[in-house]
Amino acid sequence: MNPDVASERKAPGFEVEKLVNLLDGGAGRTRTRRSIEHIINSDAVFNQENQYFLTQTERYEEAVKGAVHLRQKIKELGWTADGPEIQIAFRVLGGNLAFAVHRELFIPTITELGTDAQIAKWVPLAKDYQIIGTYAQTELGHGTYLRGLETTASFDASSQDFILNTLEVSSIKWWPGDLGRSANHAVVLAQLYTQEMCHGMHAFIIQIRSLVDHSALPGVKIGDIGPKMAFEQVDNGYLMLQNVHIPRENMLSRYSEVTSDGSYVKQGSDRIYYISMVLARVKIISSELVSALSKACVIAIRYSVVRRQSKLKPGEMEAKILDYQTQQQKLLPQLATTFAFHFMASSLDTFCNQVKVQVKTKGDILLLPELHALSAGLKAMMSESCSVGVEACRRACGGHGYSTLSGLPTLYTRVVASCTYEGENTVLQLQTARFLMKYLTRVDCGQPLPQSVSYLSEPITLHCSAKEKSDFLKPFIYIESYKHRAHRMIKDAGIKLQSLLQSGVEQYVAWNSTSVQLAKAAVAHCHYIVVNNFVETMEGLKFEPEIQQVIKMLCDLYALTGILDNAGDFLYDGFMTGKQLDLVTTSQLDLLALVRKNAVSITDAFDYPDKQLNSAIGNYDGHVYQRLFEWAQKAPTNAKINLAYEKYLKPLFQLAQSKL
Amino acid sequence: MNPDVASERKAPGFEVEKLVNLLDGGAGRTRTRRSIEHIINSDAVFNQENQYFLTQTERYEEAVKGAVHLRQKIKELGWTADGPEIQIAFRVLGGNLAFAVHRELFIPTITELGTDAQIAKWVPLAKDYQIIGTYAQTELGHGTYLRGLETTASFDASSQDFILNTLEVSSIKWWPGDLGRSANHAVVLAQLYTQEMCHGMHAFIIQIRSLVDHSALPGVKIGDIGPKMAFEQVDNGYLMLQNVHIPRENMLSRYSEVTSDGSYVKQGSDRIYYISMVLARVKIISSELVSALSKACVIAIRYSVVRRQSKLKPGEMEAKILDYQTQQQKLLPQLATTFAFHFMASSLDTFCNQVKVQVKTKGDILLLPELHALSAGLKAMMSESCSVGVEACRRACGGHGYSTLSGLPTLYTRVVASCTYEGENTVLQLQTARFLMKYLTRVDCGQPLPQSVSYLSEPITLHCSAKEKSDFLKPFIYIESYKHRAHRMIKDAGIKLQSLLQSGVEQYVAWNSTSVQLAKAAVAHCHYIVVNNFVETMEGLKFEPEIQQVIKMLCDLYALTGILDNAGDFLYDGFMTGKQLDLVTTSQLDLLALVRKNAVSITDAFDYPDKQLNSAIGNYDGHVYQRLFEWAQKAPTNAKINLAYEKYLKPLFQLAQSKL
């Protein structure tokens, strides 16, 4: 153990294991998680140590190998679908296994949109990897705007077939994971045409490759879309369809059906389509965003107590960089954000499950719009914050954070994709804003509001009541501030929108002319929700005062940093004064110094085994330089033969031999 | 030509060629640049179209091949060192040629720190690539803090040799470019020991590889440090030295020397060492930062007039995404920033040349500290802004911006390195802050101030005088605002620092406790400098009213966006009111709509040939989807044999054959 890390762990102000348990959701879950992690991490097939040296094709091969191996392992160990083991295993192996789209979109779409017969036919084969399916929605020319998709599925009553086509270049399916090299089936989203009418987007199951030799079937062109910013292991692909016939029963028909004479029959609500999107977003938040930011924090904070730079005090040793206020300012708010988002993800999960139960048991979709608005806005806000946060951690590690071996570049290039996939962030913010505008107009009518926006009908405080810096460590003070800000920004956007409409501007122009402010209002709304949720969670910990104290510090730090980062919003209408903002600054800087003391122990509580961090500079033992040096030597760029030297440099260098 | 791009170019509000000339610095320079670009772009060896598909090793080989080919080409075409051709050629080929460190650090260091004899011996060989040298400064354990470097060079009077050692793991030289696989020589920065005294950092020339077979010389261990976030083509390396002997004359001795008896003799000022760092930073600004941001703007803005998404108005075609206010807000301020920084880089170059002349002709280094402070702060601020801006452009292109083929991921992962190399940004900001604090204390003494900080002694306006939105299109209004903000933040940081010192806190603690605010003050200072410079440049264009009008719009947009992004700073002390901020918002949104009209023509004025953009979505002709589709098919991931299928999937898929 590097003594510089060891000294950080000497006297933590709290019992680390208790915080581990809190994050896991109980000591029992910690035990289960660790036992699964142990199984995974002691299996050589899953070893990812060399992944930074592999080509895109090699990464893909490893990912397929891993997925197939895990399938075998699950059978051997007798893990069942309803137990926690499989879920944990996938979380540990995360993005390094192939077939994520197969598992998380292909199968669930069939399960949700398919009839019982369709589910019975396809799902068992898919679960056993006897078929691999992709989910082909996005096209070259259209992503988030689903109604614009151009792929068509036309029913031909004579053959009882649907005929699928991607007629334009822009309608080529583009990006679906598992498509480029793996899938032999696809759920294809296409505009349904029957009896010369378009009935909008529907989902169809299509076989795209031969089960015998994996070649593309007639009328089908498939390929890989090439290199990306990350996700080298995923074979994101393209798919062209030219007059591809599929039988009538391959349209997923739980909610709508084409009968043999070509009539279109709809059953149930369209809204049900929402659910899979909503579920996907909720899952991203808990599985992708929080884990990326927490890993980045662990790596950067451990590195920052090993790295020494420049003497703070003349004559002393060089200081650990975490002792610099500027470094604390870069990293510790990110640590606080990780906790804010972890707790938010939990609450959102709970809400999501509540909605799912209501839908399943009573067909009640009343809460769905609220869940949709909340998950859209939170996904946008949290993917943005996590991306910025991971990158801040990476950059805080200086040059070593630029080395792939630190693990940080990959964390960033992966997490930032979440700002785009499953709904582009700005589009999502505006969906949340639409929900906010809808209920804002109801405030005046005195109608009851959904819980997450009920504050819009509450009286708001006009001036922050804080008088000294310690006031800003009182949660009600900062909750009130965030509430005021959200309320004011939502109202102002509403006023602008209304006044444009009243002046005779068309609805779509008014909306577009207000959209920058609407998007900001949605962010402010989500920010309030997150702060409020952090405080509620913290207050629920009263029986664990030691842990509560740690969480309180992080909660305060999260809230106050957010005020400083958005100072203009709080000063704008005189809610806060410049003097109060000075108090926030002082309080926040004090908190940095406090959190710094326990920073390493807090990151230890995420309890990541070294193999999962896969970082040369973030290991538990703090042996940063030695490990970087060892790993670098394994790089393929250190292969003995240097063709460039032989071909181009040798003749030139020979000229110098006689001169030196 | 895609009609959606063509329509954008139909009636530009100005003559594009005139803006091209302005950016080039005259019509003559435009002609020269284009002729060189033509030569480069029609040479197959320099074709970079496939670079996104190559491995790190292949990229390196291509880079070496390109560098050696250009050497030959320069000879054939008779380009001379003092002509503009070579400089332009390197700018066009940019980071894709090997030996950048050799050319920009190894040779200049010898030229600046070497004696005439040393220059005569090494430089001609180096210029002809008969030797390739690296500049080995950074170590595993130390980067920006040079005094902490651990490599030693001890003079041994008996052998008249220096003996070089990197004794600890942390002292291994790490990161130097051209070192890993190419260099046979190195300028090594090491602590000089002679007569049992340490004399601090000095530079030594060491041969590290054999000129005959390129093997590492005895006592030398070299290798490549492996994969990085970008710069795949550069062989950043490591270097260990164990008792490596070099002759006395290999210490670069223009300013200090060790005589044969081991005495240390110093001549001239230490400050001279500054110059190379300062020059390197000034060069980064003009060559790396502005070009990255301008390329990203070109790609993203062209893409945004081709991409259509969702109907703004029911019944109409889907709208170009650049017609959405939120998209304009993402991209157009970046375009304005490009111009702000282009002009700032020009002015800084001019100032830099003035200082260089003073130093060379009169040995006058009076202006050096100001140039140092200015270039440090500007490099930090501009590398930060350009990184954020490039990434904003990339994300504004949605999924396609995530594809390497868009060119955008590489632009980001490269430009963000500039936040770290040649001085980590926070460290640089604090150096600028130190300069500001020094002169702040002189204000009260009434001493004259350097030009860039002279505003600290001017009276400041307490309240912004704007009354309507058009007032914010008056440059003196926003210049005054930025001046007020910088002045106030510098003064406040100074007050905090002084009050801590007066309360008995030690200097180093006081500085550290104020460092977050000091860094912010340095940014505010630089922001004022950039806005002020933009206005001065714009006002100088009065004889080209058409162009001036375009530049004025961009200048206003840059200034107003900066106010909105930092609203808290302007509201804090009541300099602006919330109402005034609303006027800024309205004015800025109006500007977005205005700039949007000419956005494509403005980006055309950067005049990048398609080959230089190397983007599937940014070409002049706007054929985005077709080109993405064509390029993707060339990806090596589309090679015929899929080993993962053969090995892992085939047996599983066979199980399904009987069932489907």
Image (spheres, coloured by chain):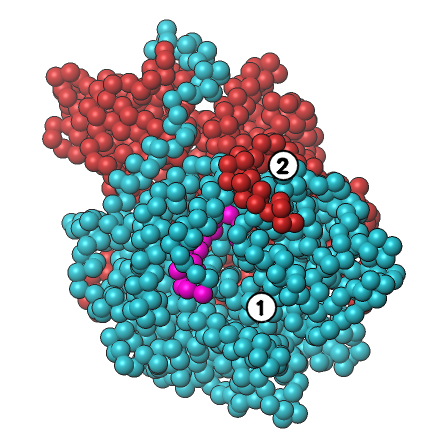
Chain colours: A red, B cyan
Q: Nearer the viewer, residue B50 or B199?
A: B199
B482 over A30 or under it: above or below: below
Task: Name the side, left or right, on which B329 lies relative to B320.
Answer: right
Residue picked out by circle 1: B278
Which quarter of the rendered picture does the C terminus of chain B lie within? top left
Query: Badge 1: how crowded within 10 Å, few (<14), some, or many (20+)?
Result: many
Mark 2 falls within which chain?
B
Secondary structure state at the residue bearing disc 1: helix
Q: Which mark is residue B153?
A: none
Q: Main secondary structure of the magenta part?
A: helix
Decide if residue B61 is in sight here: yes
Residue lying at 49% horizontally and 73% vertically, measured from the top left = B348
Residue lying at 62% horizontally and 27% vertically, measured from the top left = A47
Which image quadrant is residue B362 in?
bottom right
**Residue reaching furthest top?**
B658
On the same chain: label 1 and label 2?
A: yes
Secondary structure state at the residue bearing disc 2: loop
Percent of width and height locating residue A493? 36, 64
Q: Nearer the viewer, residue A454 or A349?
A: A349
The amino acid type found where label 1 is placed reads Val
A248 over B145 or under it: above or below: above
Percent of width and height locating residue B475? 38, 81
Query: Badge 2: how crowded within 10 Å, few (<14), some, or many (20+)?
Result: few
Which image quadrant is residue A291 in?
top right
Give the spatial CA distance, label 1 vs label 2.
Answer: 37 Å
Residue picked out by circle 2: B213
The amino acid type found where label 2 is placed reads Asp
Q: Nearer the viewer, residue A184 or B264?
A: B264
